[in-house]
Image (spheres, rainbow, N blue to C red):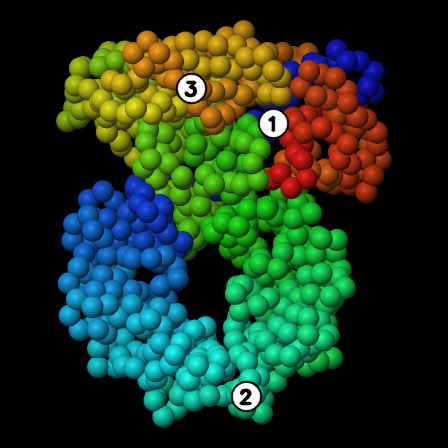
Amino acid sequence: MNIAQSKKATLRLIGVLVYFWMNFPIIVNGQARQIGLFSSDSYGGLSVSVQAGNIIFFSAFTQTHGRELWRTDGTEVGTFMVADINPGIGGSIIGYFESTSHVMNGIIYFRADDGVNGIELWRSDGTASGTFMVADIVPGSGSGAPGGFTHTNNLLFFTAGTGSSLWRSDGTAAGTFSIGSFQIVTNLKGFNGNVYFSADVNNSGQELWKSNGTAAGTQLLKDLNGVFGASLPCNFHATPNILYFMANTNDGWELWKTTGSNASTVQVKDINPGGASGVLSFYSEANAGHIGNTLYFSANDGVTGYQLWKSDGTDTGTVRISNIANGVDQNGAFPIVNGKVLVNNYASEFFWQYDPVTDIFDESEYPSRIWFNSYAGKYIFSGSEMFYADKDSVFGCEIFYADGNTGTSPFFLESHLTDNWFSSSTQGFNTILGVSSTNLVFSQSRSPYNAVIPLFSIDVSTSASCTYPTIIFPVPLSFTSAHFVWSYIPDASQYELQYRLTGNPSWNSELTPQTWVAINNLTDSADYEYRIRAFCNGAWTAFSDIKSYNSGLTVNDYVLHILADKSENDSTHRIYWLKTPQITNMQIRYRVAGTTTWQTVSNSNGYRRLTGLSPNTFYEYQWRANWSGTWDQWFPSTLYFYTRGNSLTDDGVSLLAPNSLTISPNPVCNQLNISGLDGKSYAIADMAGRIVQEGSISHSKIDVSSLRPGMFVVLVENGNRITPVKFVKQQVGDR
């Protein structure tokens, strides 16, 4: 059967597309659970994390304790506030935690204010008893304000005061003291038993200094600029035997190195000849990576723009590796994965990679997104596995997975019960804190009810495709009724919700194939417990943790919260929202995404069924509240949903091959990658069933650059079967 022969057949294919897409086994590694809840303050939500072994440290704000030091190992019992250093709402952590903390020998050193001694140097091993002030640098209520941490040879080095004094510490009060005073001291880096830094001692400009941890051993290593000017050494990067850094001389900003002596401190290469700069300046953080003593970094030779370079510390051994259009991101990190150096380039949907063994530079199979380097915690590598914050059109912003192989299925965990997919070039809804042992730890931007920030963990050590739902919560409709809604499990054919009055030994049970259930026999203002499990692959999962709910729950809020959207069938969708004493009525307006005509409905129940929808169609919607008979403005944000059916006809199944087709990236800008089907015919249809492009797959790719932004289905002919996969086409730069 030729793909383009019959529009009717194409429409029928699209009609069953989403069923197969949703039920194709998706990698869901292990058991996921919520392990914490936090609030926000002027520094935002959870800080960027700092990891010491399997303990992930971070600062977080709660309404009871303010911003304090927290830790997690990815388990509930291992997630807790380490110590209430400054009792009460005031909190002890001032500033950005990741910039004012450092790990040495499994101990985290950080600055904190206990409300008595000012901002001073503290340490913690992750226990309350092992958390204490190291030294009161400025005695009394004054602040020592330590910062700029580094370490070498079991000695912690840092700056104090206004950044004008250099200190060292062995972790004890007696072993913590000043070893030098300067006009300014910055950019500390430990290397082979000494600390190297940029300092100005007499207003002559910052130059390269070193210290062995004693006052006598703290000295100017080299004045790179001679008598005049400041070289401003910065962006230090240590390999086993060479300390690389960047500095400014008559040659501009270029790459330098030292092994610790004046004579060994030399410019490696004038990458951009003359006075122009080959590397980033003192005022930009330039990341780098290394394998052995070879440094990998971004540089600009004045001809090709910023590209990937490598250096072995010699002029001839400092060479450009890449020459790709639009260069590489000069502010990006340089992950080393499977012995290869990865770099970002946002004209590509994937990281580029350099293999020093084969000297080959090409595209990897690890996704790259524009927000990876713009925001912290958007991706992490654990061995060869990559976990990253991304978005798709069915579930919105979530956490995804790749292992670097063609055809990798996405790691999937539904942690948001609304589709928050949007066309902006960010993914601000999830932040990855780290991997502890086999637990991936990440946070959400907010919970369904309010601005409380949930923290999640998922065990990535197994490849189970069925778990109990991670998210489950009640939507109160009245004091005697509620709908319980939960996250979707791809392989689940049935769910069991159990609930009981607190203290009752017997559970009430509700079985349902949907991801919600209505409970209408609750006792007014009573305390309940509930839990859930899923049935898939012929067996029940374990039950989720027991959660609590009071049927008299009243949330005072003047903001209208959309809690969840759920597909009832291929033409009916449910929108759940939170009723409050202030908001008792609301309106929803919805339309097929990309069209201009809205349909508007009202609701006062707590959920609204949208009926008469077109099957397998991408919709967008907005909402607003009623205030004493007056409608508010439409909420400026837009949410989405996709209608899908729950059953297939035999006729529909017979047209489709098993969904073994994998495409990447998705969303896509210019090219879809499809492996193993070169020469096979394909067609691309829009959501109305119209064929908008057709041809043959060439070199495992399909050029989709001419398509307008929107949602499409690619249909690939393979023998006498046709395999469909949905994808989203985006504009270049809109990721």
**Numbered disc 1: secondary structure:** helix
Residue 450 point in image, percent of width and height: 32, 31
Q: Earlier in the sequence, mark 3 or mark 2?
A: 2
Residues at marks 3 and 2, CA–CA distance in whole angstroms? 65 Å
**Which residue is at 45% across, 9% downward?**
601
Q: Nearer the viewer, residue 331 or 144?
A: 144
Residues at marks 3 and 1, CA–CA distance in whole angstroms? 37 Å
Q: Which residue is mark 3?
A: 633
Give, as a three-letter code, the residue at label 1: Trp
As drawn, the label of residue 21 is: 1
**Numbered disc 2: secondary structure:** loop
Residue 541 in view? no
Residue 130 point in image, percent of width and height: 22, 65
Q: Earlier in the sequence, mark 3 or mark 1?
A: 1
**Which residue is at 39% across, 70% downward?**
148
**Numbered disc 3: secondary structure:** loop
**Which residue is at 42% across, 84% downward?**
202
* Circle 2 crowding by C-alpha within 10 Å: few under 14, some 14–19, many from 20: few
Relative side of 118 to 600, left or right:
left
Q: Which residue is mark 2?
A: 227
Give, as a three-letter code, the residue at label 2: Val
Residue 662 point in image, percent of width and height: 67, 36
Give, as a three-letter code, the residue at label 3: Gln
CB contact under 8 Å: marks 3 and 1: no
